[in-house]
Amino acid sequence: MIFPIGSCPGRIVRARVSLIMMTASLDGVSSGVWVSLCVLFIIGTFGIGILIAWLPLLIVSVWFVYRIVRGWIALREGRGMCA
């Protein structure tokens, strides 16, 4: 079945909506959807970036604390640390 231009079923067409008093509301909803999609994209991108950046930092920090604690224990027992 071929539909004329602008009469695709399931699509909101501005010419039809302009007859109704909700054109401004449709514009607000449309811009709200785009803004929320952009915000979700930015949050998702930074979230993944922070995860990728902080995970190695966390691993190195745990290793650093482990080496310091192990060194203090060896110092207390009077033995040396091997390299």
Image (cartoon, rainbow, N blue to C red):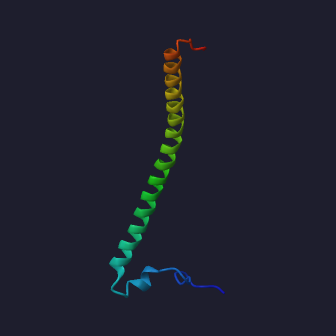
Name the residue located 49 percent from the left edge and 16 percent from the top edge. 76
Check the image and report above or below for 35 versus 80.
below
Q: Nearer the viewer, residue 39 or 2?
A: 39
Q: Total marks drawn? A: 0
Name the residue located 52 percent from the left edge and 19 percent from the top edge. 71
Check the image and report above or below for 75 versus 8.
above
Q: Position of residue 16 (x, y in %)?
A: 43, 85
- Position of the C terminus, as image quadrant, is top right
- Position of the N terminus, as image quadrant, is bottom right
Q: Residue furthest right?
A: 1
Name the residue located 35 percent from the left edge and 80 percent from the top edge. 23
Check the image and report above or below for 15 versus 82.
below
In the displayed structure, does residue 47 sit left or right of residue 18? right
Q: Position of residue 58 (x, y in %)?
A: 50, 36
Q: Residue furthest front?
A: 77
Q: Position of residue 28 (x, y in %)?
A: 35, 72
In the displayed structure, does residue 49 sit left or right of residue 82? left
Name the residue located 36 percent from the left edge and 87 percent from the top edge. 20
Check the image and report above or below for 51 versus 39.
above
Q: Nearer the viewer, residue 4 or 73?
A: 73
